[in-house]
Image: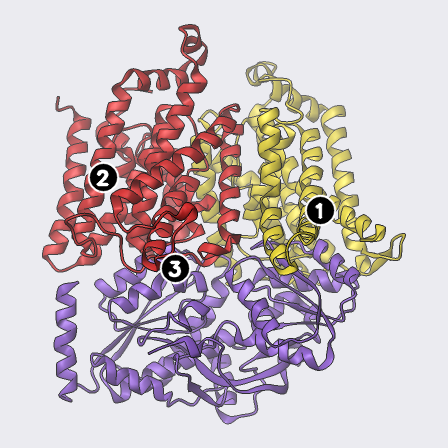
Amino acid sequence: MLTRENTVNLVLALLLLAAPLAANALGQPFYVTLATRIAILALAALGLNLALGLGGLVSFGHAAFFGIGGYAAGILSSHALSYEPMIFGLPGTVQMPVIWIVAVIAAGLVALAIGAISLRTSGVYFIMITLAFAQMVYYFAISWPAYGGEDGLSILVRNQFPGLNTMKPLSFFLVCYVVLLAGIGLFALIRASRFGAALQAARQNETRVATVGIHPYRIRLTGFVISAMITALAGALYADLNRFVSPSMLSWHMSGELIVLIILGGTGRLFGPLAGAALYVAFEFALGGLTERWQFFLGLILLGVVLFARGGLLGLLAGKAKHG
Amino acid sequence: MTLALALEQLLNGIQLGVMLFLMAAGLTLIFGVMGLINLAHGSLYMVGAFACAAVAAWTGSFWLGLIASLACAAAAGAIVELAVIRRLYDRDHLDQVLATFALILIFSEGTRWLFGDFPLYLDIPALLQGVVTLPGDATYPVYRLAIIAVGALIALGLYLLIGKTRLGMRIRAGESDREMIGALGVDIRTLYTLVFALGSALAGLAGALVGALQSVQVGMGEPVLILAFVVIVIGGIGSIKGALYGALLVGVTDTLGRFLLPQLLALFVDPSQAGMIGGAMASMLIYVVMAVILAVKPRGLFPPAHA
Amino acid sequence: MKKMLAAATMALSLGASGLAMAEPLKIGMITTLSGGGAGLGVDTRDGFMLAIKEAGNKDITVVTEDDAQKPELAVQIADKMIQSDQVDVLTGIVWSNLLMAVVPGAVAQGKFYVSTNAAPAALAGQGCNKLYFNAAYQNDNLHEAMGEYANKTYKKMFILAPNYPAGKDSLTGFKRYYKGELAGEVYTKVGQTDYAAEIAQMRASGADGIFVFLPGGMGIAFMKQFAQSGVKIPVMGPGFSFSQDVLPAIGDAALGAKASGQWAPDFDTDVSKKFTADFQKEYNRLPSIYAVQAYDAAQLILSAAAKASVKDADAFRNELLKADIKSPRGNFKFNTNQHPIQDIYLTEVVKKDGVLTNKTVEKIFTDHGDAYAKDCKI
């Protein structure tokens, strides 16, 4: 059904594909890189949106999962290039699909542990405890000497995807674009599923969910873990985009930025993260070129969005959200 | 390790805790009364430090600077409350996080715009320079003792203000039932602005006091903001008493952890390694403490009775 | 990418045939101009632009962007400058972690990088690169010099640095030359602002000297608190701990502190005096060591550009290697790993005309290279 929101979504998706294709044809590979960044940040925010938008779980610590994904890519490829085995004698790898699986599993396990404790709390406590866990991971990464600490870890050659030359900006963009679309598809499926309904119901009315025999804690924990996994996948891609991973991917500013992307685009909406990421990267890029005081104006714009444009970009373009 | 050193480290921990209390008290008060998460609280701390450094440099008097820091932070808080915060009370936490995150960006770049790119100079006043001798022949800076005293006074003052005055009664009423207090004819908008300005002034005071100990620079409020959040979450959000205990717990844990963990590890590995690993563990320690406390008591040590 | 490589090869062959000489050169400067670390970036930019302005060469353009001290942003700007602005040379990054993010990618795309400050060990040894030059030092140098200096007077040093790679390199560099006993070796949290616990340990340790490496705000906090603590042990550190950007904020607490540096504002050479005067005239403040390093980086690029086309990478590199500049520091040449060989001095913080500044005391090292050059195979 082609509602107004669906039309807007379709246009957004097509724009994100068309712009880099055009940039590439015009010999402007940098804009392909910029579009790749948008796609990856959108995927990371999409992950968070599952917990935050559907489940109402305001995680202020998703940078932890983003960074874990990044480090999975960095660590695996550094071992593959140096031929030094990792723990248990396992070899490293430069194959993206393998890296993605490792990133997703690693983040899933960590999220299970963090979520199991954090979800005992709610509201502001939940916001702060997720922040605390992310800070723990952050300080660990800074002071752990094996993989570069604060200096981070360079990925000398971008990891490979079977049948593609990922060093070409456009090829790598297409990989990220397809992964993003798959992520959006998964999000839509989850939202429409029984599990998704339960997750949203647990946000709106906890008592009612409990009375019909669903355990909100388990539903939320599952949602939190899936959300972390998607964000970790984005982290692995982000590390490959920059060919570099460092603790700054784990910092609380990153967690804040992911939240910003979601609100800019429209909380809980399918294409909200994409709209938000596109807008944010465009602001950062355009303002950064204009003035070194760009953070001041970025702050003003964000403030304006919260105060006067509730519902974010999609709220403006496609009207009020149907749910929530 | 001597007893004197242990005593000195304990004092250091308490002093750090007291400083965190000044930050956390405002934060928890604002949350308790208005239900607002204010990420920009660290910016008001920075405003206090810059105001104090600027006025102290201009007039040569730290004390005038201190007054300026209170005034400027309170004024900045009141302006922000009137212009922005008051539109956020009935929003969810998400909007509050984003709006106050935006305020951090504005405050940080705005301050740099006004004061330039380099850290400012602020020294402790002549009156409080020097050291006192502790039992066991160690010495301790007078200024740090003064900070502990100021913290204790503020804690007492807040206790009296909230427990014994009319304003305090309204604050308590606001905490337990927001609709009710409006119905009783209390001008709730003014009350909120007042509470926000009070919290801001406390943050500004903390910034000024600490500014004399460390570097007055843009971004100085962010590390302490995160610590203050840890404090109020441990203590129970909205509880001044919880903020006090939480602050002391965090201050002492952090200081003793930094001091003891490397020494403990040095028993097992070589000192250089022990320094690195112990340092890494110490930097994570308070977050571990927080996670453990929340796992056992999800609403902190002293959860407020209401809500 | 392919297209660019093709263009580069074509340009190379053109250059080799000696066609291009004084052709346009575009320099991309990525540095920290916002946030808490902006002071260093501003000095870097101003030092660099002073040399560019003095040269008055219309063919040279500099594009500057703020990295906000974020590695990801630095990478993005580098990509933009390389792919979109088509710069020939990159420079300006202050921090090692940002440098490590940008340099491998930049040199892989055939761009020169001339560092104005950061010099991690990883790029000085096995990881050295033909296109990567460092105009400042190698990260360990100033710490090594303090280790050497400490040998003379001190028997029991207490050493302290933040718990991150540059901090570990610092203490490793110090210990490489220091032969005495250690009273303590402490790593503090990055960004820590209260050092009361560490200062108490210092006093209790019975140390006769203290070496600290705490850049930026951390150093300001430490020095103030140390002075207030009443502990009387002498403090020393690498030059940037007491550089011109932080001295005013530390205040008199810094007086008497010993540091190592390749340059100090009181250098009694014509080049140095002129530089200091010009910088003061242009920006109305004393230059810091970052400004000198950036000034020299600009001079190096200018000197090479005057003789060779940047499109001819080999020729341009050879000109850079000659280091044909008049550095305020005095002697300056490149080692085999394209890091400086230079003299390193002991300085002391003094007050001159009411302004805190560094005074040169003695020379610690003559023609000092670094420990990693032997691993560099270019």
Question: In the picture, residue C168 is in which quadrant?
Answer: bottom right
Q: Is residue C43 above or below residue A271?
A: below
Q: Residue furthest front?
A: A89
Q: How many other residues sit within 10 Å of disc 1, few (<14), some (14-19) or many (≥20)?
A: some
Cα distance, mark 1 to mark 3?
Answer: 36 Å
User: According to the image, label 1 marks what residue?
Assistant: B256
User: According to the image, label 2 marks what residue?
Assistant: A179
Amino acid marked by disc 1: Leu
Q: Spot the purple chain and give its letter.
A: C
Q: Residue at x 64, y 23 (%)?
A: B303
Dot 3 lies on which element?
Answer: loop
Residue A142, image x and y in percent? 50, 52
Is residue C277 visible in the rendered image? The answer is: no
Q: Which mark is residue A144?
A: none
User: According to the image, label 3 marks what residue?
Assistant: C67
Q: Residue A256 or A227: which is nearer the viewer?
A: A227
The shade of chain B is yellow
Residue C154, image x and y in percent? 73, 76
Q: Residue furthest left?
A: A25
